[in-house]
């Protein structure tokens, strides 16, 4: 199976046209069935709660935190009822937490995830936060201040599921958050790629879409690469997509495994720094 999808390191998936059509039919049928059942692959029921009503109070356990934001009409028609920040939610979130529960000493919440606005004080109870589709992110002044405070007080954020011009947009918004900081390209020598799994070659994971090569960028405290990493951007990649569909057999197992290595390492780095 892996030989069908994977051509070379850094390439996108390659599929014959008939296989693409077959896959799309299978995904559509699966999605329709999942909406009826309310669950996917044994994961938690659908919990798309744009107001955060699905959050659980902080009780000391590690919980996956997803950042939500207003996006106006920027994504109208592209995601339907699903906000861009909620892409792959909640299955990606819960699947990663189950992996962490199995292979680490963490005992995280596996029944769902919390969603917070960037200026929510409850965010400060959680060392790790995840944002999907940052190309649609237009933070308000209070959200800019909230994220700045969160990062400088020890928080860690992962930006995922974006490509192309979204990268330029994300850099501009982060300049508002941390005017004196800038993204620096990461490589296999950076500590985050050795926090749990040894990942000397992070580029081994092919992105699930497009022909643009993936890269990984970080914002370090005081721009010092020897210091604490505060933010990671998975440019031209979508780890959440792999996490969401990992239980379906829709993608080769080795790609799902590589995507989970990133998630586990990011989480463990956030907890240790």
Image (tube, grey):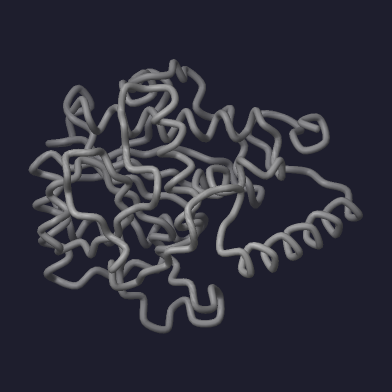
Split into 4 quadrants, where in the image is the N terminus? top right
Instruction: Name above or below for residue 238 compared with residue 216.
Output: below
Q: Residue at x 60, y 43 (%)?
A: 207
Q: Is residue 185 left or right of residue 87?
A: left
Q: Position of residue 59 (x, y in %)?
A: 17, 44
Q: Is residue 214 left or right of residue 127?
A: right
* Residue 105, quarter of the rendered image: top left
Instruction: Name above or below for residue 84 compared with residue 232.
Output: below
Q: Is residue 43 left or right of residue 8?
A: left
Q: Position of residue 125 (x, y in %)?
A: 13, 47
Instruction: Name above or below for residue 44 compared with residue 216.
Output: below
| Residue 237 visible in this rendered orientation of the protein | no
View extreme (right): residue: 18
Q: Residue at x 45, y 56 (%)?
A: 90
Q: Is residue 128 left or right of residue 72?
A: left
Split into 4 quadrants, where in the image is the C terminus? top left
Q: Nearer the viewer, residue 218 or 94?
A: 94
């Amino acid at each position: 199976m892996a030989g069908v999808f994977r051509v070379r390191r850094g390439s996108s998936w390659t599929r014959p046209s008939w296989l693409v059509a077959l896959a799309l039919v299978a995904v559509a049928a699966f999605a329709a069935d999942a909406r009826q059942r309310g669950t996917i692959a044994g994961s938690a029921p659908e919990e798309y709660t744009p107001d955060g009503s699905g959050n659980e109070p902080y009780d000391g356990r590690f919980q996956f935190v997803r950042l939500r934001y207003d996006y106006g009409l920027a994504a109208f028609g592209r995601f339907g009822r699903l906000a861009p920040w909620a892409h792959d939610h909640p299955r990606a979130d819960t699947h990663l937490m189950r992996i962490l529960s199995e292979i680490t000493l963490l005992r995280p919440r596996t029944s769902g995830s919390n969603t917070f606005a960037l200026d929510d004080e409850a965010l400060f109870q959680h060392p790790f936060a995840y944002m999907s589709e940052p190309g649609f992110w237009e933070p308000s002044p209070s959200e800019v201040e909230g994220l700045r405070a969160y990062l400088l007080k020890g928080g860690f954020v992962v930006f995922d599921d974006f490509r192309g011009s979204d990268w330029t947009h994300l850099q501009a918004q982060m300049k508002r958050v941390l005017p004196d900081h800038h993204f620096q390209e990461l490589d296999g020598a950076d500590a985050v790629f050795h926090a749990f799994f040894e990942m000397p070659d992070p580029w081994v994971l092919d992105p699930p879409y497009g022909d643009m090569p993936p890269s990984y960028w970080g914002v370090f405290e005081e721009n010092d690469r020897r210091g604490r990493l505060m933010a990671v951007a998975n440019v031209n990649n979508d780890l959440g997509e792999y996490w969401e569909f990992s239980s379906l057999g829709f993608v080769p197992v080795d790609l799902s495994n590589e995507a989970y290595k990133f998630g586990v390492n990011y989480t463990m780095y956030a907890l240790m720094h």
